[in-house]
Image (cartoon, rainbow, N blue to C red):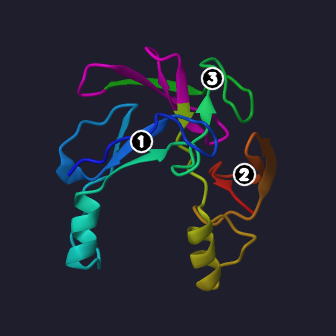
Amino acid sequence: MSVIQPDRWCATCKGPLVRYVGPAMELEESPDVTVLPPLHCATGMTDDQIRQYLLRDEWVCRWCRLRRYRVDRRDQCPYCRRCWASEGQGWFGSGEIYLTLQCECSCEARWYPERGWGETTDSWVSPERWQSLIGDGADPGKCGWCGAESFDFVRRPDGFFRRCTACKAIHRW
């Protein structure tokens, strides 16, 4: 089963679409293809949900649906404007090179040299994770990752966030 890409651009934000597939589709990851991670046992999913996950094949917006942020400059973090703290290198199955960039503000990104742009892969606490922490009686004044109780405040292109001073994790309000 293959989904035909109706248009190369998102109708909402005009950003580029990416093919979003399950691991059973046997496509290689690239800037144009996002492959879901393999399922582990004891997921609690029904057989039908597992089948849908494994055989997923759809075109989605990397900005609206996958909640990535476009990186137009390789020399600095798009959020705090500092130089990247570390840089690594990897290759897709096609041989295309990508760089993994990490900043002190907890921003992580991939840079695609052949394309001249990149995208973030932020590690902030999602609204679902935050709700689960509150539901478990966790103190909202504590970091959901390390438990620290002190935060900095960071203004980024996608909003205003708290950043844990201990582990540097980004927290949405």
Residue at the image point whose x is 23% and y is 59% from the top: 54
**Which residue is under mark 3?**
72
Disc 1 on helix, strand or loop? loop
**Which residue is under mark 1?**
6
Viewer-side residue, 121 vs 35? 35
Taking 148 as reference, is 59 left or right?
left
**Which residue is under mark 2?**
163
Distance from disc 1 to disc 2, alpha carbons, whole Å, reads 39 Å
Give the mark nearer the N terminus: 2 vs 3: 3
Residue at the image point whose x is 21% and y is 70% from the top: 41
Distance from disc 3 to disc 1, alpha carbons, whole Å, reads 26 Å
Q: Give the residue type that dot 3 points to.
A: Asp
Give the mark nearer the N terminus: 1 vs 2: 1
Up/down of 111 relative to 7, above or below = above
Taking 80 as reference, is 12 left or right?
left
Up/down of 49 relative to 170, above or below = below
Disc 2 on helix, strand or loop? strand
Taking 55 as reference, is 105 left or right?
right
Cβ–Cβ under 8 Å for marks 2 and 3: no
Q: Specify the quadrant that holds the C terminus.
A: bottom right
Residue at the image point whose x is 51% and y is 34% from the top: 16
For the record, the magenta segment spans 92-118
Viewer-side residue, 164 vs 6? 6
Q: Percent from the top left, x then y, of residue 21?
A: 30, 49
